[in-house]
Structures are given as structure tokens and as C-alpha cells.
Amino acid sequence: MKPSTRALRLAIRPKPQYTSPNSTILSSTFACQRHRIHTTPTTPAVVSPIHGTGPPPEPPQPAADSASSRLERRRKQAEVLEKVQAIRQQAKNPKKAAKEGALRRRFWKHVHVHEVDGALEVHLDARPLRHPTTKKIVRVPPSKPLLAAALAVEWDLLLSPQQATRQHLIPLTSLVCRALDIADDDAAAASSAGGGGGSVRANIARMVMRYLDTDSLLCWAPPPRSYDPLPEGAVSLRDAQKRAAEEVVGFLTSRVWPGVRIEPVLDGETLMPRAHDEATRQIVRGWVMGLSAWELAGLERGVLAGKGLLGAVRLLVEWSEGFVGTGGGDGAATGGGSGAEEKRFGVEEAARLASIEVDWQTGRWGEVEDTHDVEKEDLRRQFGSLVLLVSGTGGR
């Protein structure tokens, strides 16, 4: 029996296929791509022709005074911030704001240095500069005109009396007042029954003597290991420390402390520094106790800045107007040779002595921005204040 026409049609018709949701989404996406959903016509970019002639311009160069411009910008920002804070304080408490506003206003216009009764004084208009604690007039010896001029510049840069209460803005004034405190304490001790040096001088001598046994110039690194090779032509840290120490120690033991034996306190694989013998300590301490008030204040600043006694003593002997070495005068300052032929030991040399290891490490691995560079400049600033404090026209 032949199949019917209806049965043949059902057999030929294809079975319905299952459509997944993903295929539906893809087909919709393709449909959207074929038919744009916006009617804004696309406009191709028009490239302008180059009409210039001649060589291309030079690349931009950073401004030479970029650091000063940055500081000036920060100063203006600080002034704007102070004005905003003053306005807010005025709104909260008018009486207190008026009192603080008087402290923010600079009451002097000009700063001058005058010689009064055989001493140099810094005058804010007609008012002499006074000690912040004792209220005595700050008087600088006439043999130190550079120190007096630097004090005047420091106060001329202040914008208000309120800034004078911040120690980091008047570092030289603080150092001069420290020297005056030592002189007043010595005078009070001399007038007493016991006499001798004051307690301030004894405390400073005790402090600097602790740095003799832990001087950074006498702490040498171990010899280089086989697994840590040096670059070709480089000097090991130990050799750099040894060469610098031998130069400074040789000068001090021949010109300042003759016959004194100074050896490295940390060498090789040792962990604890060894102390110098008692005879050496007595000679060095006696020399420290015999310094003037200005030299002792400068030595204290140099020891704390460079974390060592020998480098500070070397710089002090070089620039002091007194005779703190056995040679005295220019001979002690230049190491026994002629001052015109030999280069003087200055701030740069003292800073390099105090940072031999840091310079060696940064030269090999690089320095950290806003850390090593700031410490480098701050160290030179502190050694420079030592030079200003102890130098003068007397004895030179």
C-alpha cells in the first residue's frame, strides 16, 4: 500500500531545533552592530599641514631657579592658609583673634648691626635683640662681624614675631644664645667659692667624650667578601674609611693632641666598640674643658651633627680665631704648611667625613629623593653655623 501524501509531507519536514539564550543574545548583538543606534554622521579628522620652516625648536629645559620658585610658591600658599585661619578665628573669637593678629604683624622694618660699648648688637629698628630666656641683650664680640651680619639676615627674613618662637627658623640665634649661656654659667661658677668651669661646660664635655669611643670615623666596615665583588675601579668602604681616618687622626695627634694614640674602635667582625685608654681620654677632655664658650658651643653643634668628635674638632681647629692647636695661628689651621698653598679644611670636607658610608652606599645603589639630599644639605648648614660661630678676625 502506498503512503499517503500527508505522511510524506510529515516525513520530509525538518524537526525544530533548540535555541539557547546565549545564541539569542549574540544574534541581537550582531543585529545592533549591523544597524547603528545613532544617526550622527561620522566626521573624519582633518590634519593641518605644517607650515613652519627651519629646524625644530629646542626641547624645554628646567628653569635654573626651580627650587627657589618652588619655595616661593610654598611660602605664598602658607600665607594664604594663615589668612584663612585668621578669618576663621576672627569669626569664632574676635578678642583672641585680635591679640594673635598683633603677634603675626612684624613690628620692625629694618635690621641693623651696631657696635655698642665694644660689642656688636643686632637692632630691630631701635630695639636690640635680646635673649629669649634671660632677656639680656645679645652681644657678639667685635672680632666676629660675619656672625653678627648672619644674625641680622636671619631676623630680616622673619615675617612675624611669632616665627621667632620656632627654633628651626632661628638656628643661628639659638646657637649664639647657647654660647652666651655657657659664658654666663662659667662666670657664675668662677664667682663662687669653688671656681672652675660651670655645670653646663661639664655636661657638654661629658657628652662629647661619649662620642670619642663611638666616633663614626673610627668605625670601619669589614673587608669586602668574595660573594660581594666591587665594580671595576671602585674603592671598598673600608679603604675609604681608613684613608679618611688616617688623614684626620694624623693631623690631630701632631697639631692638637701630641702624643695621643687614637685607634679604630670598631674593626673587622667585632660588634661592640672598644674604649680608648684613660690617658687619651684625660688629654682630650682637658682640651675640651679649656675651650672658650663660643668654641665649646660650636663643638657641641658639630659633634651632634656629624655623630663624631674627630671631624668636629678638625673643623673647629681649622676655623677658630683662638689658638686651640699646638701650632697656633695659621700654621695650626693649615696643618703646618703655608696657607696659600694648601687647601683649607672646610664645610664640604667635614660633611664628607661625617657621611662616608652614606655617600658610598648611595653612589652604589642610588639615593632616596627628599631624604638623602635633605640630610646632605642640613649637615652642611649645621657645619656652616659652627664655622660662623668660632671664626673671626682675632688671631688670624
Image (cartoon, grey):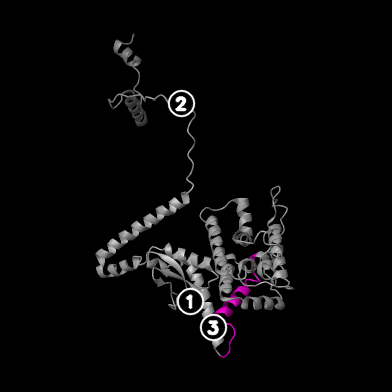
Residue 86 visible, this orientation:
yes
Residue 18 x/y as whole percent: 35, 26
Position in image of residue 368 (x %, y %) = 54, 53
The Cα–Cα distance between marks 3 and 1, rounded to whole angstroms, is 20 Å
Nearer the observer, disc 3 or disc 1? 1
Front in this rendered view, residue 88 or 155: 155
Q: Which residue is mark 1?
A: 117
Mark nearest the camera among 2 and 1 is 1
Coordinates of residue 349 in the picture (x, y in percent): 63, 60
Q: Is residue 208 magenta?
A: yes
Other-residue count near label 3 (Cα within 10 Å), few / some / many at <14 / 14–19 / ≥20: some
Q: Amino acid at mark 1?
A: Asp
Name the residue carrying label 3: 187
In 3D space, how far apart are the residues under numbered discs 2 and 3 (Cα atoms)? 80 Å
- Between 115 and 368, the residue placed more toward the observer is 115
In what quadrant of the picture does the C terminus appear?
Answer: bottom right
Question: Is 106 displayed left or right of 185 in the figure?
Answer: left
The label on residue 53 is 2
- Quick one: label 2 or label 3, which is nearer the N terminus? 2
Dot 3 falls on a residue whose secondary structure is helix
Question: At 40% across and 64% down in the image, what residue appears?
Answer: 110
Classify 10 Å Cα crowding around label 1: few (below 14), some (14-19), many (20 and above). few
Q: Amino acid at mark 2?
A: Thr
- Image point 28% across, 68% down: which residue? 98
Q: Secondary structure at mark 1?
A: loop
Q: List x then y, in percent, for residue 120.
A: 49, 71
